[in-house]
Image (spheres, grey):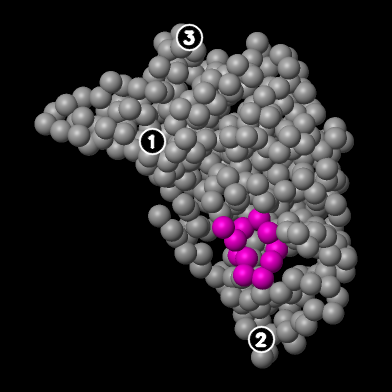
Amino acid sequence: MIRKLIASSALAACLVAGVSAETFVVSGKNVWTGTDVGTIADGVVVIRDGKVVAVGGPDTPVPEGAPVTEAEWVTPGLISAFSRTGIVEVDAEDSTNDVSAALSPFSVSLNAADGFNPDDTAVDVTRLGGVTRIAVAPAPSTNLFAGQGFLADTSGAQESDVRERAFVYVAMGEGGAGLAGGSRPASWAQLRAALDDARAYPGRYAGGGEGDVLTRRDAAALAPAAKGQQLILVSASSAADLNALMDLAEDNRTLKFAVLGGDEAWRVAGRLASLKIPVILDAFSNLPSSFERLAATQENAARLVAAGVPVAIVNLDNDSHLARLMTQIAGNAVANGLDWDEAMKSLTVVPAKIYGLAGYGVLAPGAYADVVAWDGDPLEVTTNVEAVFIDGEPQGLTSRQTELRDRYLSLDETDRPRAYSRP
């Protein structure tokens, strides 16, 4: 489902006589492009009709009268490669939590996009962190298949750009073992049987037939992934589990896999690179918090990139409300050996490639105009966002938190809300 973004009335304030309402200029002392051009000093980005039409140095022609945003740094919009932003408002309040469905008879066919709420306060908070696109996944509950994940922008508009069924999310490792019957052999057997069911759909289900582990509807939902037409995102942490996944990948060369977690991925980096399997990880993970994370290290990202593995960095500690902290995590990865440019690519270029978001994650002529202006290095904890454009449209920089802050920062006594007072 593709929903078109509607221009807000606030855009009218940006109109300048003789200039299209869709033309903007963003200039920065440093413009990081995410391409072979690298970082441009005193760079200029020209946006028109939702696309980047020019990127260059200070001599780049600027449309006369176009609104100009100036900043220290300019980058492509960041892409959160994994989150649950927009499908849960309050974890403990069931009416606002659509992350999982423990009582549902369905698994693969659960479509997380059906629960996406652009009004979720976490969406605005995420945008204020420079994140313009999010990959959102459901959580497994009683089955190792959590369901269908989706991609969305962070505009907060009801007409947000949403790409449904962008990937299938599967929990393996310790979590998958518990959901499949109590052991890793049980989880791998279930995954292989499910792929067989999906490949045999609809024939196996004709005339009231049944699959080995999937219902007819779930088999239909898994069929594209089983045929190599959809990404399968697999949660796995230990080197042993990752090797088991790669065994499956070698036996099924048409399947498209990506790893979520991969705490011990550095131990099998060479094999991951040869199979071109990307890893989405939290670079803060450096403690042996479980038996599948005994070899966790903050050098994981640096070692994987050095081996040629595509790496995307995310925040898995609070993946619903604090996805934006991925910039801080990427900064810590740099402190632990990851090249700065590679860290920026892990937030932009690599997520775009993982999910097939052609034209996103870079600043280049013809790219979609997801652009962020910053008042400092994007990976510095004290840096703030000064402007955000999504598909060429300027976005608001307010959230529920900023509005509450501004309301109570200098509250006049006469503005206090009415309340009961004892006589």
Q: CA distance from mark 2 to mark 1?
A: 50 Å
Is 277 contained in the magenta span? no
Amino acid identity at mark 3:
Ser
Quadrant of the snapshot with the N terminus: bottom left
Asked which quadrant contains residue 46, the reply is: bottom right
Residue labelled with disc 2:
19
Q: Is residue 129 left or right of residue 167?
A: right
The residue sitting at 68% across, 59% down in the picture is 362
Q: CA distance from mark 2 to mark 3?
A: 64 Å
Q: Position of residue 104 (x, y in %)?
A: 34, 27
Q: Is residue 187 above or below residue 231?
A: above
Residue labelled with disc 3:
183
Q: Nearer the viewer, residue 403 or 150?
A: 150
Q: Mark 1 or mark 3, which is nearer to you? A: 1
Q: Is residue 154 above or below residue 250?
A: below
Q: Is residue 329 left or right of residue 172?
A: right
State which region is magenta.
358-368
Amino acid identity at mark 1:
Ala
N-terminal of the pair, mark 2 or mark 3, is 2
